[in-house]
Amino acid sequence: MTPHIAAIIGGGVIGGGWAARFLLMGWDVRVFDPDPQAERKINEVLANARRSLPGLSDVALPAEGTLSYHATIDTAVAGVDWIQESVPERLDLKLKVYKTIQDHCPHDAVIGSSTSGFKPSELQQGAVRPEQIVVVHPFNPVYLLPLAELVPSAATSPAIVDKAKAILTGIGMYPLHVRAEIDAHIADRFLEAVWREALWLIKDGIATTEEIDNAIRYGFGLRWAQMGLFETYRIAGGEAGMRHFIEQFGPCLEWPWTKLMDVPELTEELIDAVAGQSDAQSGQYTIRELERARDNNLVTILRGLKAQDWGAGKLLNAQDRRVEGDVALPADLSKPIVTVHRPVPLDWTDYNGHMNEARYLQAFGDATDRMMLLVGCDADYVATGGSFFTAETHIRHLDEVHAGAVIRIETQVLAGAGKKMHLFHRMFEGDRELATGEHMLIHVSLATRKAAEPAPALAATLARLAQAHATLPKPEGAGKAVGVRG
Amino acid sequence: MTPHIAAIIGGGVIGGGWAARFLLMGWDVRVFDPDPQAERKINEVLANARRSLPGLSDVALPAEGTLSYHATIDTAVAGVDWIQESVPERLDLKLKVYKTIQDHCPHDAVIGSSTSGFKPSELQQGAVRPEQIVVVHPFNPVYLLPLAELVPSAATSPAIVDKAKAILTGIGMYPLHVRAEIDAHIADRFLEAVWREALWLIKDGIATTEEIDNAIRYGFGLRWAQMGLFETYRIAGGEAGMRHFIEQFGPCLEWPWTKLMDVPELTEELIDAVAGQSDAQSGQYTIRELERARDNNLVTILRGLKAQDWGAGKLLNAQDRRVEGDVALPADLSKPIVTVHRPVPLDWTDYNGHMNEARYLQAFGDATDRMMLLVGCDADYVATGGSFFTAETHIRHLDEVHAGAVIRIETQVLAGAGKKMHLFHRMFEGDRELATGEHMLIHVSLATRKAAEPAPALAATLARLAQAHATLPKPEGAGKAVGVRG
C-alpha cells in the first residue's frame, strides 16, 4: 500500500498530537510551523504518543510513517491526502493560511481545521474551493482521545465529509458529524459552560481549583468516561424512564443552580424530543442492564486508577490500608500463611462471571508479593537494590470461581535458602480448592538484574519460615510437570 | 467492635445506595420508607452493590451488617450514629421529617441530607438542634462513587463536621468539605450548567441525546475521570503554565460559546487566584510528569473499557479488527504459528516500565485463545456448548520486557487428540526470547463443566495441526517441573 500523507500546518500540542496519531497509524507526515521550537515540541508530543498509543491496540499497528519538516506551506501540502490546520485562533491568520494551502494542495484533499470556536462557513470566507474545508476538532491528547468533531458547512462537499469520516475512522478516531454549524461546536459548549461556572466559584470564594477538580474526578467525571449525560440520567430515572427524570428535575431549571439563567422552557415538545431520542439511543437496554454495564465500567475504571494509584484509585488504596491494618508474620509459623483474602472483582471475570485465567496468576502474584513483604522484602529493602524476581510458575486449575466470591490463598514455603525462595500457593473459596500455584523466585540485584544473595536479615527470616514449614507435608501437585498426574 | 448503626430515611435509588454502602462496610442499617415498594427497590440496589462494591477492595471487607425495615421514624433513629435523609426535594417535607428525627435520635448523631439543591441553613429552619444537621450530597451510584459533598452552615457544629468526615472516610467515601453554602453545592452547578446547555442543543436541533453523550464519553469525559478541569488545562497550558492558558482562552469568555452569558470579568486578581490555586494543587508535578500520569490513566481507562467492550473501548476493539483483517490458519503448518503480535501496553507494566508477572499469562492466554479460534473453537462453536478450559500452565521467565516493546508469541502444538490440547508458547521481542508458556487444555461440555470429546470437525483440524507440528523438535523447557533445569 502507498502510504497516505498528512500535512500538519501549525505544530504545538494539538498539531503535534495530530502528527503523532497519523504517524503511528502508518501515515507519512509533513509539518510546517515557523516556530523555531516546533521540532522540539513535536518530538516531545511524539515521545508521549509512542509510549502510550500503540499499546492501546491488541494487535501490531502498521510501521510508523516518515516525519519531515517543511520551511514553506507549498512543499508541505503538495500531493497530500489530508491537511490539518492548527494555527492560533485568529480568523484573519487562518484565512491567509487557507489561501496558501489551496494554491498548492490537491483539490480532493481534506482541509481540516482544529479550531475550537470558528464555524466552517467562517473559515471558508473568500476560499477558492470552500467545498474542501471542514472543521475537524480534536481533544487533547489527540493521540489517545477518539473524539473528532467533524463540522461541515452547507458549502462543504459531501464527498469531503465522507472522505474525512473514513480517514478519521482509519486512524482510530470517532468522527462526530455535527449536523448544524454553531459556535464552539458541541463539546466545547459544555466545557465553556463548566469553565465559566468554575470561574464564578473561584471568584466568589466558594471553591478552589483543587476542590473543583475533586468534585469532578471523584464523582460525575467517572460516569462520563463511559456514559454521557443522558444515558446516566436515564438510569437515574429508573424504571419510570427518561420522561420521569425530566419531570422530576424540570423545576430546578428555574432555580439558581448555576449562573446560567438563560434557560430553555421545558415544553411538552422538548420533553418528547429528549425522551424519544433517549429511547432511540438506549432503548435496546433495560434499566437493569444499563445499571450493570455502568457498574462493570465503573469498577474497571476505578480498579485501573487503583493500579495507577491516582485520583479515585488512590482513595481506594488508602481505604484498603485502613481496612487491613498492620501486616506482619503470624506468631504461629507452623501452618501455611494466609497471603491473600479478597473478593473476586468484576474486572477479573468474563461475561459469564468466571474468573479469567490470567487473574489466577495475578492473585498468586499478589500472594507472592505479600510473602516477600512478610520476610522483609519491603519498599525500604528494595530501595537498597535487592528484590525477588519470579523465574518459574506452575498453575493447576482445579475448580471455577465467580465474581464476588471471597478467595483465600494459603502459602507454604517449600524452600528458602541462598538466592532461592520456593513457594506453594493454594487458592480456596471456603473449603473448596480452586487452584494451586508453585513459584520459584530468585533474589536479584536490581542494578545487574542478575541473581545475588539476599541481605542477612532477610535471609534469616526466610530461613526461619522455611524451617517451620519444613514439617508440613509436601502439597499435592508440587514438583510436577504439566500433564503429569499428582 | 460494636457495629455502627445508620438510619436511612427515604429509600429509592439514593437512599438504597447509602444503605448498600453502609451495610457492605459492616454497618447495621435501619430503613424507614413508607413506599410499599421500598423493600423491593432497596434489594435491587443492594444486589447491584453486592456484585460490584466488595471487589473494588483488594482486601476482605468486614462482614456485612444487618438490614432492618421500620414502620416509623422513631424506632429507626433511636440510638443510631448516622441518619441519612433522602426524601423528595420538598423543603416542607424535609423540615417535618427532621422534626420527627430530632425528637427521637441521639443528640450527637449526624443528620445528613442527600439534597441536591437546598442549603444546610434552609434545612435547619426551626430545628431544635440545628447543629447536628448537615448536607451530605452523594452521587449515583452511591455504592461506587466516592464523592460526598459535605456542606455545613454556620450553625452546624464543628464536632458534627469532624464526625461526618471520619465516618464518610471510614465507609470509603471522599468528603469534600464545601466551605460556603451555595445553591446546588459545587458539582451539581456544573451538571446543571451542562444540562441546560444540552437542552438548548436539543431544542435548537443541533444535536441529539446520543450525539451529546458521544461528545462527552469519547472526549473530555475520559479526562475528567482522572483529572478535573483545572489540572487538565494546566497541562494544556504546557510549560508556559496555567496563567498562559487562561490568558490564551480568556477572550472566549466574551464569545457566544455557551448560552451562559453572565460571565465573570477576567481581572488580574481572578487570574492570580486561579494560577496560584493551580500551583498549590499541582505544582509538585512538572508538566511532563502530569502528561505521563494523564496518559497512563487514559490508557488504563481505555483498555479497561475495551475489556468491557463499551464506549471508547468498543471503538478500539473495532479498530483492532480493522487493522488485523481476517484471521485464519497459515497455509504452511510446518512451523510454529504466530498467535500474538502486539505492543506491551502501559497498563501491563509496573512503575519501572517492566511487564508485570500476571501479564505474561494474559499474553499466553491470548495466544491460547487465538489457537482455539484457529482450530475452529470460535463463538459459533462455543454456542453449541463446547469449549476448552485451561487445566495447567507452566511459565518460565527468561528475560524482561518493557512497555512499548512489540512482543510476538509463536505456538507449537505438542499434542492435540481426544479431549486434550497441549500447547507450547514462546514469547519473543525480535529474536530475544522472553518467556515460555506450556499449557494443557481440556475440551469440556459447557453444560456439565466436565471433560468431553470435541466435535469431529474441530478434532480433525487440531489433529492435522498436531501432526504437522509433530516433526518440530521438542522445545527447551517443555515437560519440566518448577526448579528442574531444562
Image (cartoon, coloured by chain):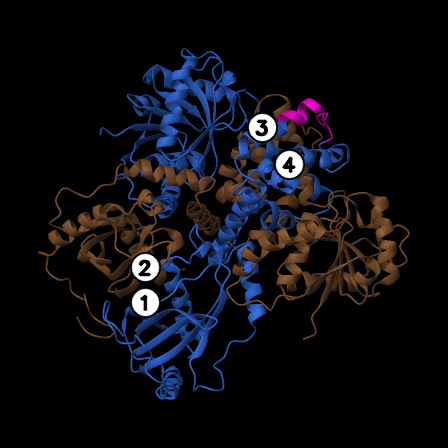
Chain colours: A blue, B brown
Disc number for residue A395:
1
Residue A366 image point, x, y percent = 42, 67
Circle 3 residues within 10 Å: few <14, some 14–19, many ≥20: some
Callout 1: chain: A
Pointer 2 and pointer 3: residues touching (CB < 8 Å)? no
> Which residue is identified by label 2?
B361
Q: Depth-wise, is mark 3 or mark 4 nearer the camera?
A: 4
Report the Cα–Cα distance between label 2 and label 1: 10 Å
Residue B54 image point, x, y percent = 55, 61
Q: Is residue A15 above or below residue A391?
A: above
Callout 3: chain: A
> Which residue is identified by label 4?
A241
Report the Cα–Cα distance between label 2 and label 3: 44 Å
> Which residue is identified by label 3?
A277
Residue at horizontal 54 percent and vertical 76 percent from the top = A326
Pointer 2 and pointer 4: residues touching (CB < 8 Å)? no
